[in-house]
Image: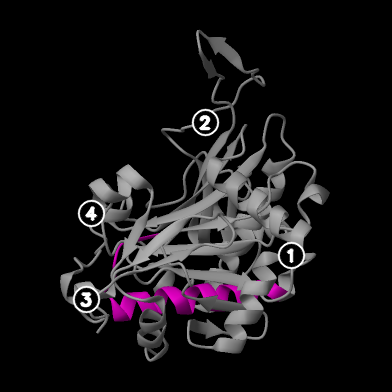
Amino acid sequence: MKNISELRQDIVSGDWVVIATGRGRRPDDFAKQTKPSKPTGIDTCPFEGLADNALYVSLKNSEIHSISKKSYSLLRRDWFLQIIPNKYPAFGKGLCSVVRKNGPYFEEDGVGFHDVVVTRDHNRSIALMKTEEVAMLIRAYRDRYLQLKDSDCVEYVSIFHNHGPEAGASIAHPHSQVVAIPVVPPTIRRSVDGSEKFYKKNKKCVHCVMVDFERKERERIVYENELFIAFAPYASRTAFEIRIFPKKHSALFETIHNSAVKDFADALRVSLLKLYKGLGNPSYNFFIHTSPAFDSRTFDHYHWHVEIFPKTGIWAGFELGTGIDISTVAPEKAAAFLRKIK
């Protein structure tokens, strides 16, 4: 066992992380410490039943449908997925705002959209769904993204999923969120700028280089199928972090073809199922990182992907004070542990 930690740098963002394996944590230790995330409170759940203000509904055997009074009774009986406005939105509809000065500071109105994507079964997380059901969820993400990306004021559309109380899921019922905002988030800006810098220097997509290297080395791969690969990043920010990439270069999530959705759904479901089984249903966040919503041709150097962060640690003084994350399990060991889980 190494008694000294190892610093690793993310080649896209430039961020440093610490792999502190000397702390003696074994992969199976996390299953013992994790508090299982168990959905409860069906009787008081706000997501039970089809909402009167649902924007779109997906039936169990078909694609997204718009709501009408004529079709409501059928949809209420057979719905699998619904997209509804967030009751407490972080961003709301309004006229496009301009940046204002407030003394030495800058501000603008939080104009945008904030939706919730709800699947029907209160007790069945994405890890426990069928691949076909996860594919329906992904198509809903994509279709709603396409509707929002060209809206006035929108510069970025964030798609994310919080599972479990430690990940910020205030409602236990499985749901994702789609938030369209008037600025490009700093994390996305760093990622896009890092990939552009690498491309200008090497004439290659940095994420494609990463994917090719991981497929060659094999030791950090968690799962792969024909079109997608899931692996533990070399510079993992937390133990058991997983990233999922399309093997073929693509800058824009919203361009994913229906023929590729099933493989993406398979990779996402299997990755989450491995965490569910291996770590005892931990809380986690996942989100889709894709190019900004405007002038898509500007970002051809980028490569969209999913990042999954299980809640295996906390940000304390060092992490908050330095911006350097500490992982107590090497990604190579985490991947080996997860690969064995069927």
> Position of 72 compared to 196: left or right?
left
Q: N-terminal of the two: label 3 or label 2?
A: 3
Compared to residue 128, the image places residue 75 above or below, namely above
> Separation of disc 3 and disc 4 at Cα?
34 Å
Dot 2 corresponds to which residue?
A: 91
Q: N-terminal of the two: label 4 or label 1?
A: 4
- Residue at the limit of the structure toward the front, as seen here: 4
Q: Alpha-carbon neighbours of circle 4 within 10 Å: few (<14), some, or many (≥20)?
A: few
Q: N-terminal of the two: label 4 or label 2?
A: 4
Residue 270 located within the stretch drawn in magenta: yes
Q: Residue at x 53, y 46 (%)?
A: 187
> Separation of disc 3 and disc 2 at Cα?
40 Å
Closer to the observer: label 4 or label 2?
2
Q: N-terminal of the two: label 1 or label 3?
A: 3
Kindly check if marks 4 and 2 are in contact, taking CB atoms under 8 A apart as contact: no
Q: Residue at x 36, y 57 (%)?
A: 325
Dot 3 corresponds to which residue?
A: 25
Q: Alpha-carbon neighbours of circle 1 within 10 Å: few (<14), some, or many (≥20)?
A: many
Q: Which mark is residue 41?
A: 4
Q: Secondary structure at mark 2?
A: loop
Amino acid type, label 1: Ser
Residue closest to the eye, 135 or 46 = 135
Dot 1 corresponds to which residue?
A: 250
Q: Main secondary structure of the magenta part?
A: helix
Q: Where's residue 161, x and y in %?
A: 45, 56
Write the start and end of the magenta stretch as one range: 260-285
Amino acid type, label 4: Gly
Residue 334 located within the stretch drawn in magenta: no
Residue closest to the eye, 286 or 24 = 24
> Separation of disc 4 and disc 2 at Cα?
28 Å
Q: Alpha-carbon neighbours of circle 3 within 10 Å: few (<14), some, or many (≥20)?
A: some
